[in-house]
Image: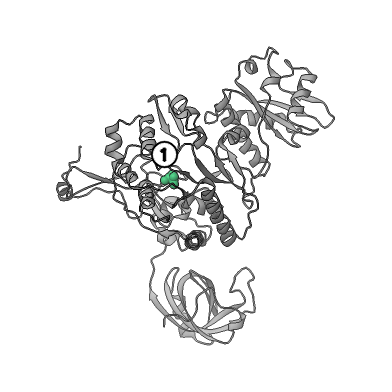
Amino acid sequence: MYRTHTCGELRKEHIGQNITLCGWIQKSRDLGGMTFIDLRDRYGITQLVFNMEINSQLCENARQFGREDVVQVSGTVSERSNKNPKMATGDIEIIAESLNLLNKSKLPPFTIEDHSDGGDELRMKYRYLDIRRNPVKNNLILRHKMAFETRNYLSEQGFLEIETPYLIKSTPEGARDFVVPSRMNQGQFYALPQSPQTFKQLLMVAGMDKYFQIVRCFRDEDLRADRQPEFTQIDCEMAFVKRDDVLNTFEGLARQLFRKVKGIEIHDFPRMSYADAMKLYGSDKPDIRFGMTFVEITDLVNGHDFKVFDEAEIVVGIKAEGCAGWSRKELDQLTEFVKKPQIGAGGLVYLKFNDDGSLKSSVDKFYSEDDLKLWAEQFNAKAGDLMLILSGNIHKTRTALNELRLEMGKRLKLRNPDVFAPLWVVDFPLLEWDEESHRFYAMHHPFTSPNPEDLSLLDTDPAAVRANAYDMVINGVEIGGGSVRIHDKDLQNKMFAILGFTEEEAQNQFGFLMNAFEYGAPPHGGIAFGFDRWCALFGGSDSIRDFIAFPKNNSGRDVMIDSPSEIKKEQLDELGLEIKK
Ligand code: ASP
Protein backbone atom coordinates (compact mmCIF):
# COMPACT_ATOMS: atom_id res chain seq x y z
CA MET A 1 0.00 0.00 0.00
CA TYR A 2 1.49 3.33 -1.06
CA ARG A 3 -0.41 5.42 1.48
CA THR A 4 -2.78 4.99 4.41
CA HIS A 5 -4.11 8.55 4.35
CA THR A 6 -4.06 11.69 2.22
CA CYS A 7 -2.23 14.91 3.03
CA GLY A 8 -5.50 16.67 3.83
CA GLU A 9 -6.95 14.15 6.19
CA LEU A 10 -5.13 13.88 9.50
CA ARG A 11 -6.58 15.56 12.58
CA LYS A 12 -6.21 15.49 16.35
CA GLU A 13 -8.09 12.21 16.57
CA HIS A 14 -5.31 10.50 14.61
CA ILE A 15 -2.64 11.42 17.18
CA GLY A 16 -0.49 8.42 18.03
CA GLN A 17 -1.34 6.51 14.86
CA ASN A 18 1.26 5.15 12.49
CA ILE A 19 0.56 6.41 9.01
CA THR A 20 2.04 6.58 5.53
CA LEU A 21 1.60 9.53 3.17
CA CYS A 22 2.64 10.21 -0.42
CA GLY A 23 2.95 13.57 -2.10
CA TRP A 24 5.05 16.40 -3.47
CA ILE A 25 7.42 18.51 -1.42
CA GLN A 26 5.93 21.97 -1.26
CA LYS A 27 8.55 23.47 0.99
CA SER A 28 11.39 22.40 3.20
CA ARG A 29 12.84 24.37 6.15
CA ASP A 30 16.05 23.63 8.01
CA LEU A 31 16.19 24.86 11.58
CA GLY A 32 19.52 23.37 12.67
CA GLY A 33 18.45 20.37 14.69
CA MET A 34 15.10 20.05 12.95
CA THR A 35 13.92 19.87 9.35
CA PHE A 36 10.31 20.57 8.43
CA ILE A 37 8.77 19.53 5.13
CA ASP A 38 5.33 20.54 3.87
CA LEU A 39 4.01 17.58 1.93
CA ARG A 40 1.25 18.28 -0.60
CA ASP A 41 -1.23 16.20 -2.54
CA ARG A 42 -4.62 16.94 -4.08
CA TYR A 43 -6.27 16.94 -0.67
CA GLY A 44 -4.05 19.32 1.28
CA ILE A 45 -0.76 19.81 3.04
CA THR A 46 0.70 18.00 6.06
CA GLN A 47 3.79 19.02 7.99
CA LEU A 48 6.54 16.42 8.39
CA VAL A 49 9.21 16.72 11.10
CA PHE A 50 12.71 15.25 11.02
CA ASN A 51 14.72 15.51 14.22
CA MET A 52 18.54 15.39 14.12
CA GLU A 53 18.68 14.04 17.64
CA ILE A 54 16.25 11.19 17.06
CA ASN A 55 17.45 10.07 13.63
CA SER A 56 20.31 12.08 12.13
CA GLN A 57 20.62 9.84 9.08
CA LEU A 58 16.96 10.31 8.15
CA CYS A 59 17.22 14.04 8.79
CA GLU A 60 20.30 14.37 6.57
CA ASN A 61 18.44 12.39 3.95
CA ALA A 62 15.40 14.67 4.10
CA ARG A 63 17.62 17.71 3.58
CA GLN A 64 18.70 16.38 0.19
CA PHE A 65 15.20 16.60 -1.21
CA GLY A 66 14.00 19.59 -3.19
CA ARG A 67 10.73 21.20 -4.20
CA GLU A 68 8.28 18.95 -6.08
CA ASP A 69 10.21 15.73 -5.40
CA VAL A 70 7.70 12.91 -4.97
CA VAL A 71 8.13 11.08 -1.68
CA GLN A 72 6.56 8.49 0.55
CA VAL A 73 6.84 9.04 4.27
CA SER A 74 5.91 6.88 7.25
CA GLY A 75 5.73 8.09 10.81
CA THR A 76 3.60 8.87 13.82
CA VAL A 77 0.91 11.55 14.03
CA SER A 78 1.77 13.92 16.84
CA GLU A 79 0.19 17.04 18.30
CA ARG A 80 1.84 20.27 17.21
CA SER A 81 3.06 22.60 19.87
CA ASN A 82 2.83 25.44 17.36
CA LYS A 83 -0.65 25.00 15.84
CA ASN A 84 -1.56 26.57 12.51
CA PRO A 85 -5.27 27.42 12.43
CA LYS A 86 -5.02 28.36 8.74
CA MET A 87 -4.31 24.75 7.77
CA ALA A 88 -6.92 22.00 7.94
CA THR A 89 -4.19 19.70 9.27
CA GLY A 90 -2.66 22.48 11.37
CA ASP A 91 -3.20 20.73 14.71
CA ILE A 92 -0.85 17.86 13.92
CA GLU A 93 2.47 16.97 12.37
CA ILE A 94 4.15 13.72 11.39
CA ILE A 95 7.25 12.61 13.26
CA ALA A 96 8.91 10.91 10.32
CA GLU A 97 10.36 7.43 10.72
CA SER A 98 11.15 6.63 7.11
CA LEU A 99 11.36 8.61 3.91
CA ASN A 100 11.37 7.13 0.46
CA LEU A 101 12.07 9.07 -2.71
CA LEU A 102 9.55 7.95 -5.36
CA ASN A 103 10.71 10.37 -8.03
CA LYS A 104 13.02 13.32 -8.32
CA SER A 105 11.71 16.59 -9.80
CA LYS A 106 13.49 19.24 -11.77
CA LEU A 107 13.19 22.66 -10.21
CA PRO A 108 9.73 23.86 -11.34
CA PRO A 109 9.75 26.93 -13.62
CA PHE A 110 7.41 28.82 -11.26
CA THR A 111 6.33 28.54 -7.65
CA ILE A 112 3.52 26.07 -7.01
CA GLU A 113 1.66 28.34 -4.63
CA ASP A 114 -1.70 30.12 -4.58
CA HIS A 115 -0.04 33.29 -5.85
CA SER A 116 2.52 31.96 -8.28
CA ASP A 117 5.37 33.98 -9.73
CA GLY A 118 4.78 32.40 -13.17
CA GLY A 119 3.26 34.41 -16.04
CA ASP A 120 0.24 33.19 -18.01
CA GLU A 121 2.06 31.70 -20.95
CA LEU A 122 4.61 29.90 -18.76
CA ARG A 123 1.92 28.38 -16.57
CA MET A 124 0.02 27.27 -19.69
CA LYS A 125 3.13 25.59 -21.03
CA TYR A 126 3.47 23.65 -17.78
CA ARG A 127 -0.25 23.32 -17.17
CA TYR A 128 0.28 20.04 -15.28
CA LEU A 129 2.27 22.02 -12.70
CA ASP A 130 -0.26 24.84 -12.71
CA ILE A 131 -3.00 22.33 -11.86
CA ARG A 132 -1.05 21.42 -8.71
CA ARG A 133 -1.87 24.91 -7.42
CA ASN A 134 -4.99 25.31 -5.29
CA PRO A 135 -6.83 27.91 -7.39
CA VAL A 136 -6.65 25.84 -10.57
CA LYS A 137 -7.20 22.53 -8.80
CA ASN A 138 -10.25 23.87 -6.97
CA ASN A 139 -11.75 25.08 -10.25
CA LEU A 140 -11.51 21.57 -11.67
CA ILE A 141 -13.08 20.15 -8.52
CA LEU A 142 -15.92 22.66 -8.86
CA ARG A 143 -16.34 21.64 -12.49
CA HIS A 144 -16.60 17.99 -11.50
CA LYS A 145 -19.28 18.81 -8.90
CA MET A 146 -21.27 20.77 -11.47
CA ALA A 147 -21.13 17.90 -13.96
CA PHE A 148 -21.98 15.34 -11.29
CA GLU A 149 -25.00 17.27 -9.99
CA THR A 150 -26.17 17.96 -13.53
CA ARG A 151 -26.09 14.25 -14.34
CA ASN A 152 -27.85 13.45 -11.07
CA TYR A 153 -30.65 15.92 -11.56
CA LEU A 154 -31.28 15.14 -15.20
CA SER A 155 -31.16 11.38 -14.64
CA GLU A 156 -33.67 11.76 -11.80
CA GLN A 157 -35.89 13.65 -14.22
CA GLY A 158 -35.73 10.73 -16.65
CA PHE A 159 -33.20 12.15 -19.11
CA LEU A 160 -30.85 9.79 -20.93
CA GLU A 161 -27.28 10.78 -21.68
CA ILE A 162 -26.69 9.86 -25.32
CA GLU A 163 -23.55 10.57 -27.31
CA THR A 164 -23.72 12.08 -30.79
CA PRO A 165 -20.94 12.02 -33.39
CA TYR A 166 -18.02 14.45 -33.54
CA LEU A 167 -17.35 13.91 -37.22
CA ILE A 168 -20.33 15.47 -38.93
CA LYS A 169 -21.19 17.66 -41.89
CA SER A 170 -20.24 21.26 -42.50
CA THR A 171 -23.02 23.83 -42.75
CA PRO A 172 -22.50 27.47 -43.61
CA GLU A 173 -24.97 28.79 -40.98
CA GLY A 174 -23.67 29.98 -37.63
CA ALA A 175 -19.99 30.27 -36.80
CA ARG A 176 -17.09 28.95 -38.87
CA ASP A 177 -16.63 25.16 -38.76
CA PHE A 178 -13.49 23.26 -37.89
CA VAL A 179 -13.09 20.73 -40.66
CA VAL A 180 -11.35 17.35 -40.80
CA PRO A 181 -10.18 15.96 -44.14
CA SER A 182 -11.29 12.44 -45.00
CA ARG A 183 -8.56 10.05 -46.15
CA MET A 184 -11.01 7.48 -47.47
CA ASN A 185 -13.02 10.07 -49.35
CA GLN A 186 -10.39 12.35 -50.75
CA GLY A 187 -11.41 15.94 -51.34
CA GLN A 188 -14.20 15.57 -48.79
CA PHE A 189 -14.33 16.88 -45.26
CA TYR A 190 -16.08 16.22 -42.02
CA ALA A 191 -16.91 19.15 -39.76
CA LEU A 192 -16.68 19.12 -35.99
CA PRO A 193 -20.06 19.96 -34.46
CA GLN A 194 -20.78 23.52 -33.34
CA SER A 195 -23.50 21.85 -31.30
CA PRO A 196 -25.41 18.55 -31.56
CA GLN A 197 -28.54 20.50 -32.54
CA THR A 198 -29.78 18.41 -35.46
CA PHE A 199 -28.81 15.13 -33.80
CA LYS A 200 -30.76 15.88 -30.66
CA GLN A 201 -33.77 16.73 -32.77
CA LEU A 202 -33.36 13.42 -34.61
CA LEU A 203 -33.28 11.67 -31.22
CA MET A 204 -36.69 13.20 -30.53
CA VAL A 205 -37.97 11.80 -33.83
CA ALA A 206 -36.42 8.51 -32.66
CA GLY A 207 -38.65 8.63 -29.58
CA MET A 208 -35.89 9.16 -27.00
CA ASP A 209 -38.08 11.73 -25.34
CA LYS A 210 -35.61 13.31 -22.88
CA TYR A 211 -32.00 13.58 -23.97
CA PHE A 212 -28.98 15.27 -22.50
CA GLN A 213 -25.27 15.23 -23.05
CA ILE A 214 -22.34 17.03 -21.50
CA VAL A 215 -20.66 17.52 -24.81
CA ARG A 216 -17.72 19.21 -26.48
CA CYS A 217 -18.58 21.71 -29.21
CA PHE A 218 -16.25 23.40 -31.67
CA ARG A 219 -16.42 26.87 -33.21
CA ASP A 220 -13.67 28.44 -35.24
CA GLU A 221 -14.16 32.00 -34.04
CA ASP A 222 -11.78 34.77 -33.08
CA LEU A 223 -11.05 34.28 -29.43
CA ARG A 224 -11.82 36.44 -26.44
CA ALA A 225 -11.24 35.88 -22.75
CA ASP A 226 -14.47 33.96 -22.44
CA ARG A 227 -14.23 31.98 -25.70
CA GLN A 228 -12.40 28.77 -26.48
CA PRO A 229 -12.34 26.98 -29.85
CA GLU A 230 -13.57 23.87 -28.05
CA PHE A 231 -15.98 24.29 -25.20
CA THR A 232 -18.53 22.21 -23.35
CA GLN A 233 -22.30 22.39 -23.36
CA ILE A 234 -24.94 20.77 -21.22
CA ASP A 235 -27.08 19.98 -24.22
CA CYS A 236 -30.71 18.95 -23.69
CA GLU A 237 -33.85 18.19 -25.65
CA MET A 238 -37.36 17.06 -24.68
CA ALA A 239 -40.36 15.86 -26.67
CA PHE A 240 -44.04 16.66 -26.04
CA VAL A 241 -43.26 19.89 -24.27
CA LYS A 242 -44.30 23.49 -24.46
CA ARG A 243 -42.05 26.39 -23.56
CA ASP A 244 -42.97 26.46 -19.89
CA ASP A 245 -42.28 22.73 -19.48
CA VAL A 246 -38.72 23.36 -20.66
CA LEU A 247 -38.29 26.46 -18.51
CA ASN A 248 -39.60 24.69 -15.39
CA THR A 249 -37.38 21.67 -15.92
CA PHE A 250 -34.20 23.71 -16.30
CA GLU A 251 -35.08 26.21 -13.65
CA GLY A 252 -35.05 23.06 -11.52
CA LEU A 253 -31.56 22.23 -12.75
CA ALA A 254 -30.33 25.72 -11.90
CA ARG A 255 -31.88 25.59 -8.44
CA GLN A 256 -30.28 22.20 -7.82
CA LEU A 257 -26.83 23.40 -8.91
CA PHE A 258 -27.13 26.51 -6.75
CA ARG A 259 -28.21 24.40 -3.78
CA LYS A 260 -25.71 21.55 -4.10
CA VAL A 261 -22.67 23.40 -5.39
CA LYS A 262 -23.03 26.89 -3.89
CA GLY A 263 -25.30 26.19 -0.91
CA ILE A 264 -27.69 28.90 -2.08
CA GLU A 265 -31.49 28.75 -2.29
CA ILE A 266 -32.82 30.70 -5.26
CA HIS A 267 -36.16 32.31 -4.46
CA ASP A 268 -37.14 34.44 -7.44
CA PHE A 269 -36.62 33.25 -10.98
CA PRO A 270 -38.37 35.94 -13.03
CA ARG A 271 -39.24 35.77 -16.71
CA MET A 272 -38.76 38.93 -18.74
CA SER A 273 -39.58 39.56 -22.39
CA TYR A 274 -36.75 40.56 -24.69
CA ALA A 275 -38.64 43.80 -25.38
CA ASP A 276 -38.77 44.65 -21.66
CA ALA A 277 -35.14 43.66 -21.13
CA MET A 278 -34.08 46.05 -23.88
CA LYS A 279 -36.39 48.83 -22.70
CA LEU A 280 -35.49 48.58 -19.01
CA TYR A 281 -31.85 47.45 -19.15
CA GLY A 282 -30.70 47.99 -22.74
CA SER A 283 -29.47 44.40 -22.81
CA ASP A 284 -30.83 40.95 -23.60
CA LYS A 285 -28.82 39.66 -20.65
CA PRO A 286 -29.65 42.10 -17.86
CA ASP A 287 -27.83 42.01 -14.55
CA ILE A 288 -30.80 42.22 -12.19
CA ARG A 289 -28.77 42.12 -8.98
CA PHE A 290 -29.52 45.82 -8.81
CA GLY A 291 -32.28 48.15 -10.04
CA MET A 292 -31.32 51.40 -11.78
CA THR A 293 -33.74 50.57 -14.60
CA PHE A 294 -34.05 52.91 -17.56
CA VAL A 295 -36.41 55.87 -17.49
CA GLU A 296 -37.39 57.50 -20.81
CA ILE A 297 -37.94 61.24 -20.87
CA THR A 298 -38.12 61.71 -24.64
CA ASP A 299 -41.55 63.36 -24.48
CA LEU A 300 -40.47 65.85 -21.80
CA VAL A 301 -37.39 67.29 -23.40
CA ASN A 302 -38.44 68.34 -26.88
CA GLY A 303 -38.84 71.94 -28.07
CA HIS A 304 -36.29 73.71 -25.91
CA ASP A 305 -33.75 74.50 -28.62
CA PHE A 306 -31.43 71.81 -27.35
CA LYS A 307 -30.62 70.24 -30.71
CA VAL A 308 -29.08 67.07 -29.32
CA PHE A 309 -32.32 66.10 -27.57
CA ASP A 310 -34.61 67.49 -30.27
CA GLU A 311 -32.96 65.29 -32.90
CA ALA A 312 -32.78 62.19 -30.74
CA GLU A 313 -35.03 59.18 -31.27
CA ILE A 314 -34.83 58.48 -27.58
CA VAL A 315 -33.73 60.33 -24.43
CA VAL A 316 -33.26 57.89 -21.61
CA GLY A 317 -31.46 57.76 -18.30
CA ILE A 318 -30.75 56.01 -15.05
CA LYS A 319 -30.99 57.22 -11.48
CA ALA A 320 -28.07 56.69 -9.12
CA GLU A 321 -29.51 57.06 -5.64
CA GLY A 322 -27.56 59.22 -3.24
CA CYS A 323 -24.96 60.26 -5.83
CA ALA A 324 -25.95 63.91 -6.28
CA GLY A 325 -22.76 64.87 -4.46
CA TRP A 326 -20.51 63.37 -7.12
CA SER A 327 -17.80 65.79 -8.13
CA ARG A 328 -17.19 67.45 -11.46
CA LYS A 329 -14.21 65.15 -11.89
CA GLU A 330 -16.26 62.00 -11.35
CA LEU A 331 -18.90 63.18 -13.80
CA ASP A 332 -16.19 64.01 -16.36
CA GLN A 333 -14.86 60.49 -15.94
CA LEU A 334 -18.32 59.07 -16.66
CA THR A 335 -18.60 61.29 -19.73
CA GLU A 336 -15.28 60.00 -20.96
CA PHE A 337 -16.45 56.47 -20.26
CA VAL A 338 -19.58 56.75 -22.41
CA LYS A 339 -17.65 58.48 -25.21
CA LYS A 340 -15.18 55.58 -25.56
CA PRO A 341 -15.49 54.15 -29.07
CA GLN A 342 -16.65 50.74 -27.73
CA ILE A 343 -19.55 52.50 -26.04
CA GLY A 344 -20.10 55.21 -28.60
CA ALA A 345 -22.32 57.80 -26.92
CA GLY A 346 -21.94 61.41 -28.08
CA GLY A 347 -22.02 62.78 -24.55
CA LEU A 348 -23.63 62.56 -21.15
CA VAL A 349 -26.23 64.85 -19.59
CA TYR A 350 -26.62 64.85 -15.83
CA LEU A 351 -29.27 66.11 -13.48
CA LYS A 352 -28.54 66.49 -9.78
CA PHE A 353 -31.34 66.60 -7.23
CA ASN A 354 -29.33 68.31 -4.51
CA ASP A 355 -29.79 67.67 -0.83
CA ASP A 356 -31.25 71.19 -0.40
CA GLY A 357 -33.94 70.35 -2.95
CA SER A 358 -32.47 72.44 -5.78
CA LEU A 359 -31.95 70.96 -9.26
CA LYS A 360 -28.78 71.35 -11.26
CA SER A 361 -28.14 69.94 -14.71
CA SER A 362 -25.49 70.16 -17.38
CA VAL A 363 -28.13 71.63 -19.73
CA ASP A 364 -29.43 74.44 -17.49
CA LYS A 365 -29.08 76.82 -20.45
CA PHE A 366 -32.00 75.12 -22.20
CA TYR A 367 -34.24 73.99 -19.37
CA SER A 368 -35.81 75.89 -16.48
CA GLU A 369 -35.94 74.51 -12.95
CA ASP A 370 -39.62 73.69 -13.57
CA ASP A 371 -38.69 71.64 -16.63
CA LEU A 372 -36.09 69.78 -14.67
CA LYS A 373 -38.60 69.12 -11.92
CA LEU A 374 -40.71 67.21 -14.43
CA TRP A 375 -37.71 65.10 -15.36
CA ALA A 376 -36.97 64.36 -11.72
CA GLU A 377 -40.59 63.33 -11.21
CA GLN A 378 -40.39 60.98 -14.16
CA PHE A 379 -37.34 59.40 -12.53
CA ASN A 380 -39.15 59.25 -9.21
CA ALA A 381 -36.07 60.98 -7.81
CA LYS A 382 -35.59 62.31 -4.31
CA ALA A 383 -33.12 64.75 -2.82
CA GLY A 384 -29.61 63.35 -3.10
CA ASP A 385 -30.16 61.46 -6.38
CA LEU A 386 -28.14 61.80 -9.55
CA MET A 387 -29.61 61.17 -13.00
CA LEU A 388 -27.44 60.26 -15.97
CA ILE A 389 -29.02 60.73 -19.39
CA LEU A 390 -28.07 59.64 -22.90
CA SER A 391 -29.78 60.34 -26.20
CA GLY A 392 -29.73 59.33 -29.84
CA ASN A 393 -30.68 56.31 -31.91
CA ILE A 394 -32.89 53.91 -29.91
CA HIS A 395 -30.80 50.75 -30.06
CA LYS A 396 -27.38 52.38 -29.76
CA THR A 397 -28.45 54.63 -26.90
CA ARG A 398 -29.96 51.79 -24.92
CA THR A 399 -26.87 49.68 -25.48
CA ALA A 400 -24.59 52.50 -24.34
CA LEU A 401 -26.75 53.19 -21.29
CA ASN A 402 -26.51 49.50 -20.43
CA GLU A 403 -22.73 49.89 -20.26
CA LEU A 404 -23.05 52.99 -18.12
CA ARG A 405 -25.50 51.23 -15.81
CA LEU A 406 -23.11 48.32 -15.38
CA GLU A 407 -20.24 50.73 -14.74
CA MET A 408 -22.28 52.57 -12.10
CA GLY A 409 -23.25 49.22 -10.59
CA LYS A 410 -19.57 48.38 -10.35
CA ARG A 411 -18.59 51.74 -8.85
CA LEU A 412 -21.41 51.54 -6.30
CA LYS A 413 -20.50 47.91 -5.48
CA LEU A 414 -23.96 46.71 -6.44
CA ARG A 415 -22.59 43.78 -8.44
CA ASN A 416 -21.73 41.61 -5.48
CA PRO A 417 -20.16 38.35 -6.73
CA ASP A 418 -21.71 36.48 -3.78
CA VAL A 419 -25.24 37.42 -4.84
CA PHE A 420 -26.88 35.50 -7.68
CA ALA A 421 -29.89 36.76 -9.61
CA PRO A 422 -31.00 34.40 -12.39
CA LEU A 423 -33.83 35.05 -14.83
CA TRP A 424 -35.28 33.88 -18.11
CA VAL A 425 -35.35 36.24 -21.05
CA VAL A 426 -38.14 35.12 -23.41
CA ASP A 427 -39.83 36.14 -26.67
CA PHE A 428 -36.71 37.00 -28.63
CA PRO A 429 -37.20 38.22 -32.19
CA LEU A 430 -37.12 35.28 -34.59
CA LEU A 431 -35.09 37.04 -37.26
CA GLU A 432 -32.35 39.58 -37.51
CA TRP A 433 -31.95 41.71 -40.63
CA ASP A 434 -28.41 42.03 -41.93
CA GLU A 435 -27.83 45.26 -43.83
CA GLU A 436 -24.65 44.05 -45.48
CA SER A 437 -25.87 40.80 -47.02
CA HIS A 438 -29.41 42.13 -47.28
CA ARG A 439 -31.03 39.07 -45.80
CA PHE A 440 -32.55 37.75 -42.60
CA TYR A 441 -30.57 35.58 -40.24
CA ALA A 442 -32.10 33.39 -37.57
CA MET A 443 -31.45 35.12 -34.28
CA HIS A 444 -31.16 31.74 -32.52
CA HIS A 445 -30.96 29.10 -35.26
CA PRO A 446 -33.11 28.04 -38.23
CA PHE A 447 -34.93 25.32 -36.25
CA THR A 448 -36.49 27.70 -33.74
CA SER A 449 -40.25 27.94 -34.03
CA PRO A 450 -42.08 31.23 -34.22
CA ASN A 451 -44.30 32.20 -31.32
CA PRO A 452 -47.66 30.62 -32.29
CA GLU A 453 -49.42 33.99 -31.85
CA ASP A 454 -47.16 35.58 -34.47
CA LEU A 455 -47.41 32.90 -37.16
CA SER A 456 -49.56 35.04 -39.42
CA LEU A 457 -46.91 37.80 -39.45
CA LEU A 458 -44.40 35.45 -41.06
CA ASP A 459 -45.58 36.44 -44.54
CA THR A 460 -46.41 40.09 -43.92
CA ASP A 461 -43.84 41.36 -41.39
CA PRO A 462 -41.20 38.72 -40.63
CA ALA A 463 -39.07 41.16 -38.62
CA ALA A 464 -41.89 41.51 -36.08
CA VAL A 465 -42.24 37.78 -35.45
CA ARG A 466 -41.26 36.68 -31.96
CA ALA A 467 -39.50 33.38 -31.52
CA ASN A 468 -40.50 30.70 -29.07
CA ALA A 469 -36.98 31.04 -27.68
CA TYR A 470 -35.46 31.71 -24.28
CA ASP A 471 -32.16 32.43 -22.58
CA MET A 472 -31.16 31.77 -19.00
CA VAL A 473 -29.21 34.73 -17.66
CA ILE A 474 -27.37 34.93 -14.34
CA ASN A 475 -25.78 38.19 -13.14
CA GLY A 476 -25.61 39.60 -16.66
CA VAL A 477 -24.09 36.45 -18.14
CA GLU A 478 -25.95 34.37 -20.72
CA ILE A 479 -25.66 30.88 -19.28
CA GLY A 480 -27.88 29.02 -21.73
CA GLY A 481 -30.35 29.35 -24.52
CA GLY A 482 -32.82 27.26 -26.42
CA SER A 483 -36.18 27.13 -28.09
CA VAL A 484 -39.24 25.16 -28.93
CA ARG A 485 -38.44 23.76 -32.37
CA ILE A 486 -40.26 23.60 -35.62
CA HIS A 487 -41.46 20.01 -36.05
CA ASP A 488 -43.50 20.52 -39.18
CA LYS A 489 -41.74 20.02 -42.47
CA ASP A 490 -43.65 22.71 -44.34
CA LEU A 491 -43.01 25.34 -41.70
CA GLN A 492 -39.34 24.37 -41.60
CA ASN A 493 -39.12 24.72 -45.39
CA LYS A 494 -40.78 28.11 -45.19
CA MET A 495 -38.25 29.13 -42.58
CA PHE A 496 -35.37 28.08 -44.82
CA ALA A 497 -36.92 30.11 -47.63
CA ILE A 498 -37.18 33.22 -45.42
CA LEU A 499 -33.51 32.72 -44.52
CA GLY A 500 -32.66 32.82 -48.20
CA PHE A 501 -31.96 29.12 -48.79
CA THR A 502 -32.90 27.80 -52.20
CA GLU A 503 -34.86 24.54 -52.04
CA GLU A 504 -31.79 22.74 -53.29
CA GLU A 505 -29.51 24.24 -50.61
CA ALA A 506 -32.01 23.38 -47.91
CA GLN A 507 -32.26 19.83 -49.22
CA ASN A 508 -28.48 19.51 -49.49
CA GLN A 509 -27.72 20.73 -46.02
CA PHE A 510 -30.69 19.65 -43.99
CA GLY A 511 -32.39 17.02 -46.18
CA PHE A 512 -31.76 14.39 -43.50
CA LEU A 513 -33.75 16.41 -40.98
CA MET A 514 -36.54 17.23 -43.44
CA ASN A 515 -36.82 13.55 -44.33
CA ALA A 516 -36.96 12.59 -40.67
CA PHE A 517 -39.75 15.11 -40.14
CA GLU A 518 -41.84 13.06 -42.57
CA TYR A 519 -41.84 10.11 -40.19
CA GLY A 520 -43.75 11.46 -37.24
CA ALA A 521 -41.66 14.13 -35.55
CA PRO A 522 -43.11 14.92 -32.11
CA PRO A 523 -43.41 18.50 -30.87
CA HIS A 524 -40.12 19.17 -29.09
CA GLY A 525 -37.87 21.80 -27.59
CA GLY A 526 -34.65 22.11 -25.69
CA ILE A 527 -31.79 24.16 -24.47
CA ALA A 528 -28.02 24.16 -24.21
CA PHE A 529 -25.97 25.65 -21.39
CA GLY A 530 -22.41 26.94 -21.66
CA PHE A 531 -20.94 24.60 -19.09
CA ASP A 532 -17.51 26.26 -18.85
CA ARG A 533 -19.14 29.63 -18.41
CA TRP A 534 -21.49 28.37 -15.74
CA CYS A 535 -18.51 26.92 -13.86
CA ALA A 536 -16.65 30.23 -14.19
CA LEU A 537 -19.64 32.15 -12.87
CA PHE A 538 -19.93 29.85 -9.85
CA GLY A 539 -16.19 30.09 -9.35
CA GLY A 540 -16.33 33.89 -9.37
CA SER A 541 -14.22 34.34 -12.51
CA ASP A 542 -14.74 36.04 -15.87
CA SER A 543 -12.56 33.62 -17.75
CA ILE A 544 -13.72 30.15 -18.75
CA ARG A 545 -10.11 29.21 -19.40
CA ASP A 546 -9.50 28.87 -15.67
CA PHE A 547 -12.09 26.10 -15.55
CA ILE A 548 -10.76 23.96 -18.38
CA ALA A 549 -7.97 21.52 -17.57
CA PHE A 550 -6.06 22.06 -20.80
CA PRO A 551 -7.27 25.24 -22.52
CA LYS A 552 -5.99 27.03 -25.61
CA ASN A 553 -4.45 30.50 -25.47
CA ASN A 554 -5.79 33.63 -27.15
CA SER A 555 -4.43 32.62 -30.54
CA GLY A 556 -6.09 29.23 -30.31
CA ARG A 557 -2.83 27.45 -29.51
CA ASP A 558 -2.14 24.76 -27.00
CA VAL A 559 1.33 25.92 -25.98
CA MET A 560 1.93 22.80 -23.91
CA ILE A 561 1.64 20.25 -26.71
CA ASP A 562 2.48 22.92 -29.31
CA SER A 563 -0.59 22.59 -31.47
CA PRO A 564 -1.70 23.28 -34.14
CA SER A 565 1.38 22.01 -35.93
CA GLU A 566 2.47 21.06 -39.40
CA ILE A 567 1.99 17.51 -40.61
CA LYS A 568 4.27 15.34 -42.74
CA LYS A 569 4.14 15.40 -46.50
CA GLU A 570 3.09 11.71 -46.51
CA GLN A 571 0.10 12.53 -44.34
CA LEU A 572 -0.90 15.32 -46.70
CA ASP A 573 -0.50 13.01 -49.69
CA GLU A 574 -2.68 10.36 -48.08
CA LEU A 575 -5.35 12.98 -47.61
CA GLY A 576 -4.91 14.28 -51.13
CA LEU A 577 -4.04 17.73 -49.77
CA GLU A 578 -1.41 20.22 -50.78
CA ILE A 579 -0.28 23.25 -48.77
CA LYS A 580 -0.13 26.46 -50.77
CA LYS A 581 3.09 28.25 -49.92
N1 ASP B 1 -27.92 24.22 -30.05
C1 ASP B 1 -28.21 25.53 -29.53
C2 ASP B 1 -26.91 26.29 -29.30
O1 ASP B 1 -25.83 25.71 -29.33
C3 ASP B 1 -28.96 25.49 -28.25
C4 ASP B 1 -30.34 24.95 -28.40
O2 ASP B 1 -31.15 25.52 -29.11
O3 ASP B 1 -30.64 23.95 -27.74
O4 ASP B 1 -26.93 27.48 -29.05
The quarter in which the C terminus is drawn is top left
Residue 292 figure quarter: top right
Q: Which residue is found at the position 53% from the left and 37% from the top?
A: 427
Is 463 placed above or below 65 here?
above
The residue closer to the viewer here, 568 or 377, is 377
Q: Nearer the viewer, residue 201 or 72?
A: 201
Q: How many tags in the picture?
A: 1
| Residue in the picture at 16% in, 48% down | 569
Amino acid identity at mark 1: His
Q: Quadrant of ligand 1?
A: top left
Q: Is mark 1 within 8 Å of ligand 1?
A: yes
Residue 380, percent from left and from top: 76, 32
Colouring chosen for the image of the structure: one colour
The residue indicated by pointer 1 is 445
The image shows residue 485 at horizontal and vertical percentages of: 43, 43
Instruction: Write down the quadrant of residue 321 in the picture.
Output: top right
Q: Where in the figure is residue 437, as x and y percent of width and height?
A: 37, 25
Please name the residue shown 56% across and 31% down the image: 399
